[in-house]
Image: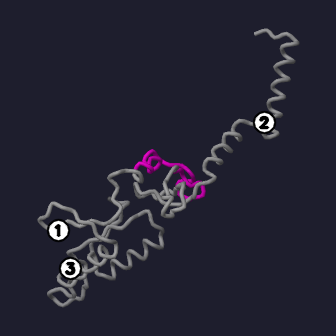
Amino acid sequence: MQLSRRQFMKVTGSTLAGSSLALMGFSPATALAEVRQYKLAAATVTRQTCTYCSVGCGLLMYSLGDGAKNVRSSLIHVEGDPDHPVNRGTLCPKGASLMDIVHSPNRLMYPEYRAPGSNEWKRMSWPEALDRIAKLLKADRDANFIEATDDGKKVNRWISTGMLAASASSNEAGYITHKVARSWGLLAFDNQARV
């Protein structure tokens, strides 16, 4: 490629002008970022943990609306949390599609109960569901708790029920969960990360 002196000066001058404008803050990337920030400026940001797997990636969830009766809050954008130590702002394809879970018509919003032999699910409140779970756990533990073996060794174990813990929680929450499960006498105790 042959350049005349005049063409060389034009190319050099336009390159110098373009780089000078970029250094002064007139770059297109900055302008595009500001447009994006403007769109999300009115949104409420909530930090959350991804629900898909046991990695526990951090999320930033943007929603519009104040949650009042006349303006229901609605999720509009999900992205990785750059301050989270696990994923540092990145998300896998499953985590990036969490809006589909939130807006799915099949998403359960409340506990449901199906009586034995019934084909119909009945809605119940959270306090009712937690009370029912606690009563069933207590009844099962009272019926199946083993204090000692046949030869008199004290074992204090409960082998008819197991517990599967979530692995997206912190070390402290995992420690407390383990202590609670072992204090009940549970032997079948595992973590989601091993499943």
The picture quadrant where one finds residue 185 is: bottom left
Q: Which residues are magenta?
A: 78-100
For marks 3 and 2, the one nearer the N-term is: 2
In the rendered structure, does residue 86 fall within the stretch colored magenta?
Answer: yes
Q: In what element is the residue under mark 1?
A: loop
Q: In what element is the residue under mark 3?
A: helix
Return the x and y of residue 112 as percentages of the image width and height.
27, 65
Q: Residue at x 79, y 40 (%)?
A: 25
Camera-side mark, 1 or 3: 1
How crowded pointer 3 is (Cα within 10 Å; few <14, some 14-19, many 20+) is rated as some
Return the x and y of residue 35 as percentages of the image width and height.
66, 43
Q: Residue at x 74, y 36 (%)?
A: 27
Q: Quote the CA–CA distance across marks 1 and 2.
A: 68 Å
Write down the residue under mark 3: 140
Camera-side mark, 1 or 2: 1
For marks 1 and 2, the one nearer the N-term is: 2
Q: Residue furthest bottom?
A: 152
Q: Is residue 137 above or below residue 119?
A: below
Asked if the residue under mark 3 is in contact with the one under mark 1, i.e. CB atoms within 8 Å, the reply is: no
Q: Quote the CA–CA distance across marks 1 and 3.
A: 18 Å
Q: In what element is the residue under mark 2?
A: helix
Q: Residue furthest left?
A: 117
Pick whichever, 58 or 44, lies toward us. 44
Write down the residue under mark 1: 115
Instruction: Say which amino acid is labelled 3.
Output: Asp
Q: Residue at x 22, y 87 (%)?
A: 147
Q: Is residue 155 above or below residue 176?
A: below
Q: Quadrant of the N terminus?
A: top right
Write down the residue under mark 2: 22
Instruction: Say which amino acid is labelled 2.
Output: Ala
In the rendered structure, does residue 7 fall within the stretch colored magenta?
Answer: no
For marks 1 and 3, the one nearer the N-term is: 1
